[in-house]
Amino acid sequence: MAERVYCLYRVSTAKQVDHDEQNQADIPMQRKACHEFAERMGWTIVREEQENGVSGFKVSAADRDKIQLIKEHAKEGKFDIFLVFMFDRIGRIAEETPFILEDLFASGVRIWSVNEGEQRFDSHVDFLTNYIRFWQASGESKKTSIRTKTALGQMVQEGRFRGGTAPYGYHLEKSGIINKRKHEVNKLVIDAEEAEVVRMMFNLCVSAGYGRWRLAMFLNDKGIKTRNGTNWHDASVGAILHNVMYKGILRSGSTYSEPFHELQIIEPSTFDLAQKLMTERAYEKNEERTAPLNTAGQSLLSGNVFCGHCGGRLVLTTNGKVVKLANGERKGVKRIRYICYNKTRRRLDCDGQTGYTMHILDEAVTQVLHQIFDRMSSASDSVILGSTEDRHMAELRAEVKRAKAENSKATTEYESMKAEMVKVVLGKSDMPKNVLSEVVNECRDKVIATSERLTALTADLERGNARVSEMKSELSRIRTWSEIFDDSNMEVKKMIANYIIKRVNVFKGYKLDIELNLNVQQFLNGLDSISVDEEPTPAAAS
């Protein structure tokens, strides 16, 4: 009577990124190969089980119904031979898969692979060969998983262009590198003329508060055309303002490269400042917005000035009045004021002033800005940045050091337990294999946990270093603003005031309560406090 055969076919969900490598066998091919092999051997296939999208490395045998069913039927004597396309179709977990085969063998079942022949258990060498095979398969699975997850990231990290049209600000040049398809690979290079337009967009966005619609109008009015010779559209400008590539960072989905200096058109600090400004001016944040929606006009404050009594936003209004000159003539004079929107529209009861003369309030805020600039310019970097950040970074570095030690210890214990597993296979250890397998799993879990903690702490350290670098850039930017503020036009002054000041609360008699933006406040924490509640002089208040 022909021997009875059970077959198992499995494919995981992982797809290879590099399509030039041999793809993993699919179910129909495994089935065809097993049927042809069984026919040659004179066997009869009595049952076939199939696992779709099941990882042999990540999913334990205890959670795989097909494996449990096959083991149960083996104990019941329902088949004689267990046949797979390759042994790694059974699983790739080094700590448990070899023992699945031993359990089947102990039930009187012979184990065969189409490609690797029969797995014997006649000697300790057979047991060791079995264990080593799955130990290697486990390692290959890890490497395949890493390749699958990082292949695309590696392409991005290497700065390789994946095809298509070069973004505005760049053009393509031949790299001299030939790919596997015998085609020469293109590389991205900064286009000097287009890059100047990109820099103009970001400078106007950051320094003068231009939004994408206003930028498109500006470029079109100046006769600056797109690459295709057409007028700019606000959506195209918006895409440029949000494209991280201008920092020299390549992106594919959620994968980002490290910055490539040769591809950097916009300074990272300028790019990040533009993102912050655009986020604050988004429509859905209108209620809490403090950034100016429009930088046109003669006022210094816009969007960040509020009534100190009711909390309502102060808005600008213009009216005229007639004044009598010294020669007896009468002349119309335009009067610009900040008025409490809640009070004038009777939305809320407000016991504050209805309005505040624009030039008086602006001058009071300008005096505060000058005080901040003077303090920031006269103090050293070490005083302004303070020691708090240094202490935090020192503590973080110590945590990383401890985490590395814990991870190294856990890895050593794991390797020791795996070595003990080999002794069990060879019959040189009295430790029960199920107990040892459990210990190995615990050690592996500890390696994973300590590795994850080390990765998280290292990321925190990198972010901390980036934060310190960002603070130094911010400090340098503020010092530059202090030098150009008085000579700048009102658009630039308005943006500088907004970057320094988050919110101005105005009370009766022009008393001010000013809330600074976080970075500026942190810089000032180590300096003498700045008074912001002084009343303007009687002459200025007239």
Image: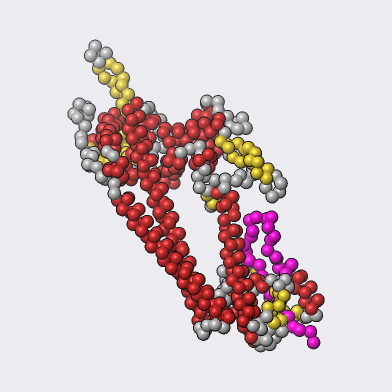
Q: Is residue 342 visible?
A: no
- Closest to the observer, 348 or 507: 507
Residue 473 position (above or below residue 105): above
Is residue 300 magenta-colored?
no
Please, is residue 482 above or below residue 463 in the view? above
> From the viewer's perspective, is residue 158 above or below residue 531?
below
Give the image location of residue 530, x and y in percent: 23, 39
* Quadrant (top left, top right, bottom left, bottom right) of the C terminus: top left
Report the residue at 37% width, 60% height from top.
Answer: 399
362, 440: nearer the viewer: 440
Q: Residue 443: x and y, percent?
A: 47, 72
Taking 207 as reference, is 62 left or right? Answer: right
Where on the picture, by quarter, is residue 48? bottom right
> From this viewpoint, which residue is outermost toward the top?
327
Residue found at x 50% / y 44%: 259
Task: Residue at 52%, 77% (x, y): give it.
Answer: 420
Chain part drawn in magenta: 1-30
